[in-house]
Image (cartoon, rainbow, N blue to C red):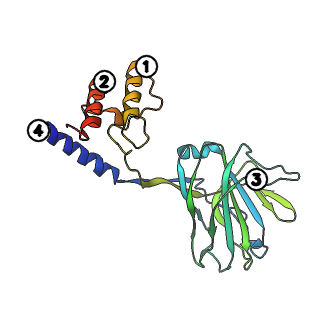
């Protein structure tokens, strides 16, 4: 009965390892105000290298702390949605301690991470930026940069959001300008496969091998209580949900016989 219970428990652990966590969404600045300049300025779509940067304050993104962001969605306010433009934008993101841009000689924030290239379809009412790889948000004010990398046709396009009380938007090419607007945005984060950590019974030092070094590591742990360099899940050699001298005996028996006794 004991062995059957252990086998059943192992089956549940394996099942848990293949269950995918659900992605979560956070929508910020759900206002009805509109602005044509953020998250990008469609009037400048015919100007290659034209940059728009938008800063979102850390306080609005508390739920994203330590999370992996996989996409950001923006909301077009114009009736009929996106106007055909043939532009391609490079999207980069990052964190900053700056909350706004200076009104005099504003400077773009550097050191951002490129996450996607974006085109858009005429008629779209939402523009989704799917990241090439998840970006881990570690806190601080969040910067989104859009840069024209393949010029298209200039047009007018407005976005829903909230008017800001600081100059949180920068426009830059040959000269710089600022604006004050938080575009409504939906951040998708989390999700993906979250397998349980691999358990290799007897691999006490976590080097993917089971040998005499693991006996030494286990004895050192039992004498000192220092967990550094010890994988406790692997140290339960007799699988009784405890780590003690009995596990040393079980590990030595395994090394001598080449087989676990339970």
Instruction: Establish if 230 lies above or below 207.
Output: above
Image-based side of 194 in relation to 58, left or right: left
Residue furthest front in the image = 256
Total number of numbered discs in the rendering: 4
Q: Nearer the viewer, mark 3 or mark 2?
A: 2
Residue furthest left in the image = 1
Sequence-earlier tag: 2 or 4: 4
Which picture quadrant has residue 41? bottom right
Residue at the spot x=70%, y=56% of the render?
54
Instruction: Establish if 41 lies above or below 253.
Output: below
Q: Which residue is mark 2?
A: 244
Instruction: Establish if 42 lies above or below 32.
Output: below
**Residue 109 drawn at (x, y percent):** 76, 52
Q: Is residue 84 visible?
A: yes
Please give the label number shown on residue 224.
1
Which picture quadrant has residue 58? top right
**Residue 53 drawn at (x, y percent):** 73, 58
Q: Nearer the viewer, mark 4 or mark 3?
A: 4
Report helix, strand or loop for mark 3: loop
**Residue 152 drawn at (x, y percent):** 72, 79
Near mark 4 (Cα within 10 A), the count class, few <14, some 14-19 or many ≥20, is few
- Mark 1 → mark 2, Cα distance in angstroms: 12 Å
* Front residue of 10 and 143: 10
Sequence-earlier tag: 4 or 1: 4
- Figure quadrant of the N terminus: top left
- Mark 1 → mark 3, Cα distance in angstroms: 48 Å
Q: Which residue is mark 4?
A: 1
Q: Which residue is mark 3?
A: 110
């Amino acid at each position: 009965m004991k062995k059957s219970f252990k086998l059943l428990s192992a089956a549940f652990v394996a099942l848990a390892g293949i269950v995918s966590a659900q992605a979560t969404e956070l929508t910020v600045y759900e206002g009805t105000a509109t602005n044509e300049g953020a998250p990008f300025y469609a009037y400048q779509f015919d100007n290659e290298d034209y940059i728009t940067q938008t800063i979102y304050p850390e306080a609005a993104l508390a739920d994203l702390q330590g999370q992996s962001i996989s996409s950001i969605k923006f909301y077009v306010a114009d009736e009929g949605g996106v106007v055909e433009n043939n532009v391609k934008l490079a999207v980069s993101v990052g964190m900053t301690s700056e909350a706004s841009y200076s009104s005099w000689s504003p400077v773009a924030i550097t050191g951002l991470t490129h996450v996607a290239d974006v085109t858009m379809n005429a008629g779209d009412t939402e523009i989704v930026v799917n990241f090439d790889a998840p970006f881990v948000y570690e806190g601080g004010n969040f910067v989104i940069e859009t840069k024209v990398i393949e010029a298209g046709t200039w047009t007018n396009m407005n976005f829903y959001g909230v008017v800001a009380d600081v100059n949180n938007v920068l426009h830059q090419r040959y000269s710089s300008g600022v604006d004050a607007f938080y575009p409504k945005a939906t951040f998708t984060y989390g999700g993906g496969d979250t397998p349980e950590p691999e358990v290799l019974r007897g691999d006490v030092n976590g080097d993917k091998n089971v040998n005499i070094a693991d006996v030494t590591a286990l004895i050192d742990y039992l004498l000192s209580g220092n967990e550094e360099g010890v994988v406790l899940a692997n140290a339960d050699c007799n699988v009784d949900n405890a780590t003690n001298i009995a596990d040393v005996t079980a590990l030595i028996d395994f090394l001598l016989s080449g087989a676990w006794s339970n």
